[in-house]
Image: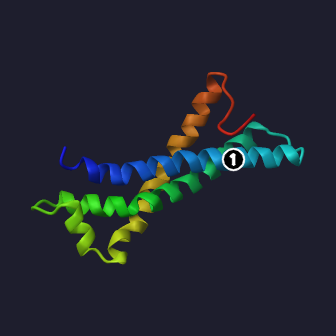
């Protein structure tokens, strides 16, 4: 359980940002389409889901990057605690590896959230954010 605080420092911001961003963006997108009296075809729904998932991936990756940097440093071994890592880090250290993580997370999160919407639709539920 020693690493649990570091893992939570990464996963809580990641999960909260991912789900909230996706939900809010899809809801607002569908609301905008509805107010413009725009037809919601399957292609439009897929596009909304994909674009909102991509934005959610970027946001969640950036929100959890500091926690990921701390977790990586703690996991290197030794006797470093989270407090030791935080004291030794400069601002740039919290965002080390951001570009690689963005590419990695964008592919995973986008596919995850799009599949989530596809599965919801296949069992008769409306897409995330759709009314």
Q: Is residue 45 above or below residue 69?
A: above
What residue appears at the point 74 percent right and 37 percent down from the top-left corner? 42
Q: Is residue 62 left or right of residue 126?
A: left
What is the x, y in percent for residue 85?
23, 67
Q: Position of residue 69 (x, y in %)?
A: 31, 63
Q: Nearer the viewer, residue 105 or 79?
A: 79
Whether residue 36 is situated above or below residue 103 in the rendered picture: above
Quadrant of the image containing the C terminus: top right
* Depth check, front residue: 17 or 124: 17
Q: Tag 1, which secondary structure?
A: helix
Position of residue 34 in the picture relative to residue 14 (left or right): right
- Give x and y (percent) for residue 97: 35, 68
The vertical placement of 128 against 24, above or below, is: above
Q: What is the quadrant of residue 76 in the picture?
A: bottom left
Tally the numbered discs: 1
Q: Residue at x 27, y 50 (%)?
A: 5
Q: Residue at x 38, y 49 (%)?
A: 11
Depth check, front residue: 94 or 111: 94
Residue identifier under label 1: 48
Position of the N terminus, as image quadrant, is top left
Q: Residues within 10 Å of mark 1 (few under 14, many from 20)?
A: many
Residue lying at the far top of the rendered structure: 123
Q: Quadrant of residue 105?
A: bottom left
- Residue furthest left in the image: 78
Q: Residue at x 58, y 51 (%)?
A: 21
């Amino acid at each position: 359980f020693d690493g649990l605080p570091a893992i939570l420092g990464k996963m809580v911001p990641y999960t909260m940002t991912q789900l909230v961003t996706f939900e809010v963006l899809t809801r607002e997108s569908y609301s905008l389409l509805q107010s413009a009296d725009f037809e919601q075809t399957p292609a439009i729904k897929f596009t909304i889901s994909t674009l909102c998932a991509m934005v959610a991936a970027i946001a969640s990756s950036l929100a959890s990057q500091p926690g990921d940097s701390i977790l990586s440093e703690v996991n290197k071994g030794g006797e470093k605690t989270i407090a030791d890592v935080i004291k030794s880090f400069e601002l740039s250290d919290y965002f080390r590896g951001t570009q690689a993580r963005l590419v990695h997370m964008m592919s995973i999160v986008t596919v995850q959230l799009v599949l989530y919407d596809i599965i919801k639709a296949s069992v008769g539920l409306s897409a995330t954010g759709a009314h």
